[in-house]
Image (cartoon, rainbow, N blue to C red):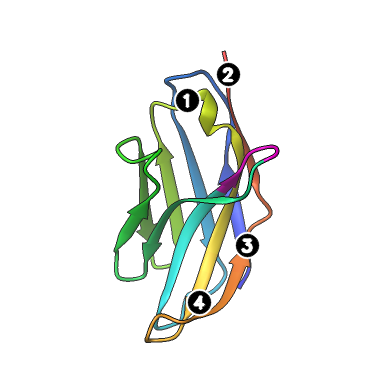
């Protein structure tokens, strides 16, 4: 599975950005797609994820500001509103392939895209 990311850039606090990620293949019975981020000096953390049947999960820091969606079963979009300086990080798209019982088989990663929130 190859992941192609788009979006990101520089935005002022309070602004919005949209990240998209297209997977080359999604013909699997169970998977999730999502976005992680890594700020300088910090560990990579989950931002939001969505299962192939539409169940979403958000980290508390972005709940109510970010919205994740899955289109055509292979494109995940993260709409980020009311951005804050602490949202600045490299954002990575993730495709997690799982068994029917939820055991992780493999994680695929995008190349990362920079999001900078600054005035």
Dot 2 or dot 4: first in sequence order is 4
| Magenta stretch in the rendered image | 37-41
Residue that appears at 30% across and 70% down: 53
Callout 4–callout 3 Cβ contact below 8 Å: no
Above or below: residue 108 compared with residue 83: below
Dot 3 or dot 1: first in sequence order is 1
| Percent x, y of residue 59 | 40, 47
40 part of magenta stretch: yes
Callout 2–callout 1 Cβ contact below 8 Å: no
Q: CA distance from mark 3 to mark 1?
A: 25 Å
Dot 2 or dot 3: first in sequence order is 3
Residue assigned mark 3: 109
Callout 2–callout 3 Cβ contact below 8 Å: no
Secondary structure at badge 1 equals loop
Q: CA distance from mark 2 to mark 1?
A: 8 Å
100 part of magenta stretch: no
| Percent x, y of residue 54 | 29, 64
Q: From this viewpoint, which residue is outermost toward the bottom?
A: 100
Q: CA distance from mark 2 to mark 4?
A: 35 Å
| Percent x, y of residue 34 | 47, 57
Dot 4 or dot 3: first in sequence order is 4
Q: Quadrant of residue 49?
A: bottom left
Mark 4 Cα shell of 10 Å, populated few (<14), some (14-19), many (≥20): many
Q: Which mark is residue 97?
A: 4
Mark 3 Cα shell of 10 Å, populated few (<14), some (14-19), many (≥20): some
Which mark lies nearer to you, 3 or 1?
Answer: 1
From the viewer's perspective, tell me whether residue 113 is left or right of residue 104: right
From the viewer's perspective, tell me whether residue 41 is left or right of residue 77: right
From the viewer's perspective, tell me whether residue 90 is left or right of residue 32: right
Dot 2 or dot 1: first in sequence order is 1
Residue assigned mark 2: 118
Residue assigned mark 1: 84
């Amino acid at each position: 599975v190859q992941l192609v990311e788009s979006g990101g850039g520089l935005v002022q606090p309070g602004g919005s950005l949209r990240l998209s990620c297209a997977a080359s293949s999604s013909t699997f019975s169970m998977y999730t797609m999502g976005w992680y981020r890594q700020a300088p000096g910090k560990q990579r953390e989950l931002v939001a994820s969505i299962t192939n049947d539409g169940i979403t999960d958000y980290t508390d820091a972005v709940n109510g500001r970010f919205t994740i969606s899955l289109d055509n079963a292979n494109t995940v979009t993260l709409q980020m509103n009311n951005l804050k300086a602490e949202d600045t990080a490299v954002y990575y798209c993730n495709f997690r392939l799982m068994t029917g019982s939820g055991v992780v088989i493999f994680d695929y990663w995008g190349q990362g895209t920079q999001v900078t929130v600054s005035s």
